[in-house]
Image (tube, rainbow, N blue to C red):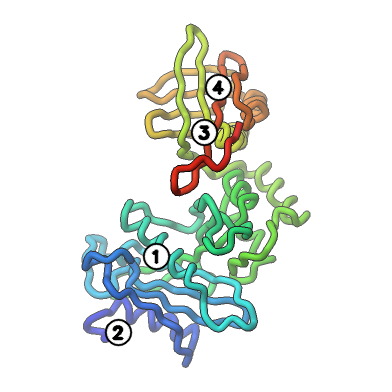
Amino acid sequence: MTDTDLAPGWDAIDAALARLYPGIEPLHYGTILKWSLGGDDPLDGVSVYRREDHWHFVTYGMSELYVKESSDPDVSGWGFEFTFRLARAADEEQPPVWALNFLQNLARYVFSTGNVFEPGHHINANGPIAVDQPSTLIRAATFADDPELGVLDTPHGTVRFLQIVGITLDEYAAVELWDATRLLSVLSAYLPNLVTDLNRASLTENAEVAAAIAEGVRRDGSSTGGIFTDVAAWRREGDVTVVRLGANAAPRIGRLAHARVSHGQGLLVQSSDSAIGFRAGDSFAVQENDGVLEIFLSPAEAAEFARIAQPRAGRYELAGLVLEIEKSLIRNPEGEVVEEIG
């Protein structure tokens, strides 16, 4: 499998890891039936290195391991391999299986959708990232360059070692209101090597971190230019424009619209059948542009929009706009309603 003539991309990854871990043989978990042969797992393998305080996972399969198939000569495959650093207890001898499944799930998403991850991207896992630890606060993730591996040149093009960093929902909210890369630069002082620790509390509770986030949001605004949500629609009622949002997403949309508009930027909110854009303006105005409702708000109006966009079902007025918030029903994987919001 690792003969240079058969797997030059694999060998290049092995060589990079050998430089970081000289003389150390990793635990390796291979895929029995490859994705290319009809299997369910896109990754051909995952190597895991035991560190004093964490496990270091590195994937094989997001880049071109065997032959060059993509048309871009400068980039290998999807252009990256995942890495993941997970806190390890002193007596823990084997890495947890859920982490291997987590990496396969992320790879499956990329292979199925064609959407790639890059440093600064972020995702909400809609639950604990470790399915067997429901009490963990780590329920989202962002991505960064692996601090020790960086970017690799291979015979098939460059490969970025893209590290997954588990974060809390409070930290995820800070990412959306500010910027993932800037937030990680603050958190790195408390998370050496950006290790994911399922047992930690939210670092937004730290006074220094909270102050840095507040200053960053004030200074830079939000880097989140668009979001997708289940409920986002609009209609005309005479001279009034009615915007309909779900109670679950309304506060998030309000916060982001305020953060973006206050810095002269826009926010696009999309659902499966509609799109609403919030834009910076001197005063309230609405217009339709190619099927997108554009709402222009002054900074003060954006602040008022954020104030009324709360998880409470009802109708709320702002200038010539009516905000209609409907109850959100949260369902489990079996489709059962487990929570009502609003």
In the image, is residue 227 above or below residue 111?
above
Q: CA distance from mark 2 to mark 3?
A: 49 Å
**Residue where numbered disc 1 is placed:** 104
Say whether disc 2 or disc 1 marks the residue closer to the N-terminus: 2
Q: Which numbered disc, 3 or 4, marks the residue closer to the eye?
A: 4
The amino acid sitting under disc 1 is Gln
Query: Of callouts 2 and 3, which one flags the residue occurring earlier in the amino acid sequence?
Result: 2
Which residue was labeled with disc 2? Answer: 2
Q: Is the C-beta separation of discs 2 and 1 under 8 Å? A: no
Residue wearing tag 3: 266
Amino acid tagged 3: Gly
Judged from the image, the secondary structure of the residue bearing numbered disc 1 is helix
Q: CA distance from mark 1 to mark 4?
A: 40 Å
Calculate the distance from the C-alpha at mark 3 to the C-alpha at mark 4: 21 Å
Q: Amino acid at mark 4?
A: Glu
x, y percentage for residue 84?
A: 50, 69
